[in-house]
Each structure stands twice: as C-alpha cells, then as structure tokens.
Amino acid sequence: MTANHLVSTLEAYDRWAASYPPEAHNPLMRAEQKAMLAHWPDVAGRRALDLACGTGRYAKLLAQSGAREVFAADFSAAMLRQVSGGIPVRSNMMRLPFVGDAFDVVISGLALGHATDLLDWIKEVGRVLGKGGVLLYSDFHPEAARAGLTRSFKDESNRSFTLPHCYYGVDDQCGAITAAKLTLEVVHELRVGVDCREAFAGSEAFYRQWHGLPLVLIVRARK
C-alpha cells in the first residue's frame, strides 16, 4: 500500500504535470466534460480563456470550437509547458493579468476549489468578461467532500498525493454569482451512478456505496 502525501497545490500540480494528458483521462473527467459540452457557449469568432487550464484540455476544445483567440492561464509552469491549444499565461487565478472586458468566454474545469476566496474569484472572472460574456465552470461537488471523498493522484513513482481543496456550498456559489452582478443560467449536478456510471476497476462497489451522491457541479453564468 502506498502512503498518501499532503502537498501544496502548486507542488501537487507540478508533480502531476508529466503524466497529466490534455484530455479527459478518467471516468469522472469524461462525465464532467460531457456535461460541460452540453452547456457549451457559442465561442465561434470569440476571444476565450481557459482558466486554471492545467495542460490545456479546454483550451484545445475552445480552439476546436472556432474561438478567434484562446488564452490558457495556470499557475503551474510545468502544466503550461504542455499546453498546445492556446497562448499559455502563467498567473494566479485570483489576480489575472488581463484588462477588464478582455474575454467573451471563460471556461474553468475542476478548479474553483483552489480559489482562496469564492466571491473574489467570481468578481475577478466578471472583471475580465465583457458585457454578455459567459462563464462556464465545473468543480467537485461539496457534498462529495462532506462524504469524505478527496482529490488525489499518483505520480510516476506510484506515490499517492492528496490535493488541498476548498469546498464552497452550492447556495454560496449561486449567491456569489449574484453578488458579482452576473446572471445565473445553469446549475447542473452530476450524480454517482446516474450521470457518472462508466465502468472502472472497483466501480461496482463504488457505485453501490455512493449511488446518487452529487460528485461534480456545473455552473454557467452570463455578465
């Protein structure tokens, strides 16, 4: 049995980068991406940001969707070195190096839990969105955290790492969107065994134990 190490968020992603492909590479991510694409905004001819992009999974999809220009922002230089679908920008997602109204679309996948303050993050995204711009993001559901599920990965040496993560309630997220003067359009919960049901090693026991538990939250809002 491998030990489970607690590390800083940046150290974790730097360690993970070498084995982190720029695509949905596990059942949860595939379910999350399918739901994100179901609520995908019209990006053709528009300027878009993949926020907290990792290796640029959504940057690639934005480019494939016809975005005029795609930026991919992340604080991990190791992750950014693998980005190929957009212009990589190293930055803290709480303080973005872009002028106001810079983007028509902001996409962020499974990253809100790394924000140090929910309202400040929403306001910062709102600042860089132009009028009528769309924010679409996903994150691990707070109910999954309360149930004891964690974010973890194994590095190339098979060592397990658990990532620090802040869990913001659904009502708190909706309230922050309103407080930031954005209009809430979509709140979509993905549940174990309902939306997330792809088979994997040990999935039968997992789905039996956690059936119906909200695992991922998808939110879309407009400025």
Image (cartoon, rainbow, N blue to C red):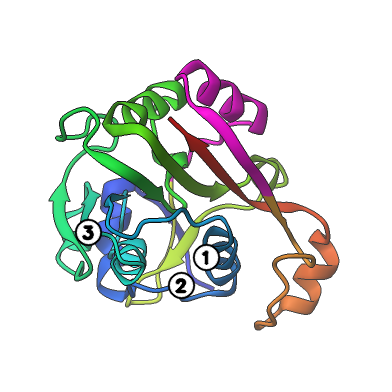
Q: Which image quarter holds the N terminus?
A: bottom right
Frontmost residue, 85 versus 213: 85
Q: Residues within 10 Å of mark 1 (few under 14, many from 20)?
A: many
| Residue 168 shows in the view | yes
**On the image, which quarter does residue 56 sit in?**
bottom left
The amino acid on which the numbered mark 2 sits, given as a three-letter code, is Ala
Frontmost residue, 43 versus 80: 43
**Image side of residue 85 versus residue 172, left or right:** left
**On the image, which quarter does residue 142 sit in?**
top right
Q: Residue at x 44, y 53 (%)?
A: 109
**Which residue is denoted by mark 2 in the rendering?**
24
**Which residue is denoted by mark 3 in the rendering?**
68
In the image, which residues are magenta? 164-188
Q: Is residue 185 above or below residue 81?
A: above
Frontmost residue, 57 versus 169: 57
Q: Which image quarter holds the C terminus?
A: top left
Q: Earlier in the sequence, mark 3 or mark 2?
A: 2
The amino acid on which the numbered mark 3 sits, given as a three-letter code, is Arg
The amino acid on which the numbered mark 1 sits, given as a three-letter code, is Gln
Frontmost residue, 71 versus 13: 71
Are the residues flagged by discs 3 and 2 in contact, CB closer than 8 Å?
no
**Image side of residue 42 versus residue 171, left or right:** left
> Label 3 vs label 2: CA separation?
23 Å
Q: Residues within 10 Å of mark 3 (few under 14, many from 20)?
A: few
Q: Residue at x 22, y 46 (%)?
A: 75
Q: Nearer the viewer, mark 3 or mark 2?
A: 3
